[in-house]
Amino acid sequence: MKIYFKIVMVICFIIIPTFFFLNMCSDASNTVQKEFSTSAMLKKYEYFKDVSAAIDEKRATIDMYQSVLLTIEDKTSFDYQQTRTEMQGLISMHNSLCSEYNSAMSKFNYAFCNKGTLPASNLDPLPREIKPYILSI
């Protein structure tokens, strides 16, 4: 009877906790592998490039709308109001993209955003700086 009790105690206090500890370590290593693998980093890099390009495109479109607004002389005309409303929508989309970009960029120190650490073939890193919001028209 005593030998069975010792075996049960060894199982309960040594083997089972060791199994749970090793399982937690395995889960942590799987998470690290999934988040920092080469394919995951490539997807994150492509995501940042795509969002950065979309922000730049929205900024250029907003600048174009502002120049159109300057050419319209009658500030009460339908064309002026329509252009202004469209520009406000573009500003909203721009600010939303900036918020998404800034939030994702601040979550981790991505190496592909650091100038000087890139291979010689690619000397233009993604900007580490925060994308500016448009506050007014």
Image: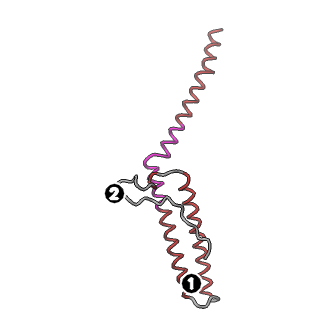
In the image, the segment drawn in magenta is: 27-49
Asked which quadrant contains residue 114, the reply is: bottom left
Q: Amino acid at mark 1?
A: Leu
Residue at screen point 65% across, 9% down: 2
- The residue indicated by pointer 1 is 69
Marks 1/2: CA–CA distance: 42 Å
How many marks are shown on the rendered structure? Answer: 2
Residue at screen point 55% across, 32% down: 23
Residue at screen point 51% across, 67% down: 55
Q: Position of residue 44 (x, y in %)?
A: 48, 54
Quarter of the image where the N terminus is located: top right
Q: Position of residue 103 (x, y in %)?
A: 57, 57
Quarter of the image where the C terminus is located: bottom right
Q: Position of residue 71 (x, y in %)?
A: 54, 88
- The residue indicated by pointer 2 is 121
Count residues near mark 2 (Cα–Cα under 10 Å), then give few for <14, some for 14-19, many for 20+: few
87 to 76, vertically: above or below: above
